Amino acid sequence: MGLAGFGTLAARTTWLQMVRGPELAAQAQAERTVTWVNRAPRGDILGRDGTILASSAVSYDIGVNQVKIAQYERWEERTDPDTGQTVSELVGHGAAAAAEQIAEILELDAQELGAMMVGESTYAIIAEAVAPDTWRRINALAIPGVEPDQRTRRTYPAGSVAGNVLGYTQEDEGRVLVGTAGLELTQNDALTGTNGKGSVEVGKLGAIIPTGRQEEVPATAGTAVRTTINPDLQAIAQDAIDEVVQAQGADWGCVVVMEPATGKLLVLADSGAVNPSDPGATPEESRNARSVQAIFEPGSVGKVITFAAALEEGTMDPQDTWTVPYTWTAANGQTFRDSHYHDTQTLTSAGVLAESSNVGTVQIGEQLDDQVRYDYLRRFGYGQVTGIEMPAESAGILSASSDWDDRTRYTTMFGQGIAGTALQAVQVLATVANKGVRVAPRVVDAWIDAEGNEIMQDTPQGERVISEATAQTLTDMLIGVTQEGGTAEAASIDGYLVAGKTGTTEILTEDGTVASFVGFTPARDPAIAVAVIVYRPDGTYGGTVSAPVFRKVALAAMHTLGIAPDPSVIAAQAAAEADAVVAAGQGESAGEEG
């Protein structure tokens, strides 16, 4: 080779070393580098007491490259008895040799596992949801072609408890869990963590090169969400509403329990609650929270707003008297009647509310201007979303007063011609219980990041709807609803004063009624407001269908919250029962004498 040839070779060598060298080295390193994703656990969802309602666990799906497995050789070292030297001996090869080792760890049959490893696939799954410790034992075997797929799986330890609140998830194309309903959806950004990554250099047979480059970036778990839900009380409420829905042959029902002063929801229960671990087992229309999405005419529960407005505007006093016939015709020709036939009565305003008289209510309501009543309906929360941290909340239906026709201007006085949710219904009574201040409901209490730092949810700013004096007067009137002679005696609780209102309204779009009871207790120092809604029960009235559910749930709440019975209420209730026994005895005596 001449000087020119040597010069060309030298130049070529220099070019390869100085220019292409780093590029080729990087390419070679990339070809022998195995990378993976460290999946971030999704944040937990907790009950108000820290009970885990939703959690995540990292596991592995284990696959094999069947082509590589076929080339696997298993060598073992032994001591040669003749020479005393350590030598390597081939003891097995291919899928059978790999399966023999892995099957023991997975507690599977080696022959069946080996059959799964034979073929031409570059990734055939041989085990799913394997625990990290188990995968580490398999990985330590260093069998080329055995490849993990790290995944994050969602678990719901409480089953269907609060299932319609929690929602559920699904994996996106990148194997990341994404919320598709409930809090899993609305809190998805917070719950989603940040994935890490890792990489190692491996030799031709797949073994890790000890001196090779290795990288490990750990994942950061998502933020935990602590709810306001009391899991034990939620479970009781779900059982209670399921029981009445089944007994009444109803379409569905729901229970909402709210702290009037804070807006925190202790219970947001729907009948037939979905189990988030298996949402497909529940009909699609029952997987979401009807308590915040389904709307209905509130019926007589809406009378509370009419009475609140009349008291606040000074057009009515609890002791005012009204002549209440069974039917009554307004000046515009619209006729209204009460739910039960009765002779013409003289009732006080308090009596009209206790007996839930439509006729008495429209006489009281027509003293108010339509726009004034519309404004009170809005201020109590109808026609607008509450802002709860749940998806697809309905604002209900509340048309402008200028759009009310001759009949609607009256029906809105007793809860027809408008529509709202169970959440809006409980908000009305919670406003009265909270001395006239409406506090928006919420179901998220705090966010807790991966380092344990806690960010509390702000208490919503309350809005005064009626004066404290009006709220107190209305409370006294609502207590009468649950006393003897009222429409909701079945809602009364031994040792506790209950204030509330029944509701029964016909469904305009189909046969049937909506039976409801909304109330609060202890009436003089309210701790909870409760709404019970039953849609299309066999029974008709809220006082007989929904009030007993209220009593069961409210009593459980008193025990859960540690609120003892009031001795003065116990004494008053005992005296009332004694008077009733005496009156009944006198009636029987009179009957015998007659």
Image: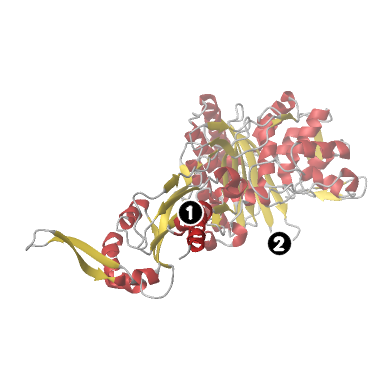
Q: Is residue 492 above or below residue 8?
A: above
Q: Secondary structure at mark 2?
A: loop
Q: Work out which residue is located at the far left of the displayed protein and give it.
A: 82
Q: Which amino acid type corresponds to the residue marked 2 in the rendered image?
A: Asp
The residue located at (69%, 42%) in the rendering is 424
Q: CA distance from mark 1 to mark 2?
A: 87 Å
Specify whether 34 is left or right of 79: right
Residue 461, quarter of the rendered image: top right
**Tags 1 and 2 touching, CB below 8 Å:** no
The residue beneath circle 1 is 17
Q: Is residue 287 above or below residue 345?
A: below
The residue located at (38%, 64%) in the rendering is 145
**Along the line of sight, the residue nearer the viewer: 232 or 584:** 232
Give residue 300's position: percent from left, percent from top.
72, 44
**Along the line of sight, the residue nearer the viewer: 417 or 585:** 417
Give residue 394's position: percent from left, percent from top.
71, 49
Mark yes or no: residue 483 visible: no
Q: Which mark is residue 511?
A: 2
The residue located at (35%, 49%) in the rendering is 211
Give residue 489's position: percent from left, percent from top.
60, 41
The quadrant of the image that shows the N terminus is bottom left
**Along the line of sight, the residue nearer the viewer: 32 or 556:** 32
Q: Which mark is residue 2?
A: none
Q: Secondary structure at mark 1?
A: helix
Labels 1, 2: front one: 1
Q: Which amino acid type corresponds to the residue marked 1 in the rendered image?
A: Gln
The quadrant of the image that shows the C terminus is top right
